[in-house]
Image: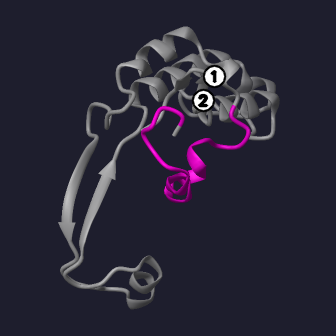
């Protein structure tokens, strides 16, 4: 909105108003920022797509009513994300979480897996990093 690409009313239709609570941008590495920079303003890469569809048949009337769907309606499906950014944050935290299973008595079937209790310091730091949308006051990573 600050740069003329949206209006205040748009925020009502953007998940979490464009920024997840408890996001901690300071946890994000320079490598993650670099990987995400080329995808800002795009659908991303890989399997991300935009598809125009028509509602052909209603299978669940109640669900369709809740979503305002009706036969013949044109809809748009978008699958996107911060693939490079999100992947890099995940990769960064694989290193951070490497010792967490032993610390918390978690036994995993494969040494390539990591885990930490969601309420642990490691779990909370990982979640706040994955929630980070706003990177600096002048740079925003969005889908």
Image disc number at residue 129: none
Query: Does 10 lie within the magenta span?
Result: yes
Image coordinates of residue 78 in percent, x first then y, are: 31, 52
Residue 99 shown left or right of residue 61 in the figure: right
Q: Residue at x 58, y 13 (%)?
A: 29
Q: Are marks 1 and 2 in contact (CB under 8 Å)?
A: yes
Mark 1 is surrounded, within 10 Å at the Cα level, by few (under 14), some (14 to 19) or many (20 or more) other residues, namely few
Front position in the image: 139 or 9 = 9
Mark 1 vs mark 2, foreground winner is 1
Measure the C-alpha gap from mark 1 to mark 2: 7 Å
Residue 88 shown left or right of residue 29 in the figure: left
Q: Residue at x 41, y 38 (%)?
A: 81
Front position in the image: 33 or 9 = 9
Residue 33 appears in the rendering? yes
Total numbered labels? 2
Image coordinates of residue 129 in percent, x first then y, are: 64, 28
Image coordinates of residue 100 in percent, x first then y, are: 73, 24
Image coordinates of residue 128 in percent, x first then y, are: 69, 33
> What colour scheme has been applied to the protein in the rendered image?
one colour
Q: Residue at x 71, y 43 (%)?
A: 21
- SS class, disc 1: loop
Above or below: residue 48 compared with residue 135: below
Snapshot quadrant of residue 35: top left
Q: Residue at x 57, y 33 (%)?
A: 133
- SS class, disc 2: strand
Mark 2 is surrounded, within 10 Å at the Cα level, by few (under 14), some (14 to 19) or many (20 or more) other residues, namely some
| Residue occupied by mark 2 | 134
**Magenta segment:** 2-23
Snapshot quadrant of residue 99: top right
Query: Does 14 lie within the magenta span?
Result: yes
Looking at the rendered image, the quarter that the C terminus falls into is top left
Image disc number at residue 137: 1
């Amino acid at each position: 909105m600050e740069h003329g690409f949206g209006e205040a009313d748009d925020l009502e239709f953007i998940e979490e108003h464009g920024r997840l609570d408890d996001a901690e941008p300071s946890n994000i590495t320079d490598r993650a920022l670099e990987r995400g920079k080329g995808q800002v303003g795009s659908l991303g890469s890989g399997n991300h797509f935009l598809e125009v569809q028509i509602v052909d048949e209603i299978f669940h009337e109640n669900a369709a009513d809740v979503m305002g769907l009706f036969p013949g309606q044109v809809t748009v499906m978008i699958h996107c994300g911060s693939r490079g950014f999100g992947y890099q944050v995940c990769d960064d935290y694989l290193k951070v979480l490497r010792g967490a299973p032993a610390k918390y008595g978690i036994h995993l079937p494969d040494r390539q897996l990591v885990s930490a209790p969601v309420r642990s310091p490691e779990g909370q730091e990982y979640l706040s990093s994955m929630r980070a949308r706003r990177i600096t006051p002048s740079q925003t990573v969005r889908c």
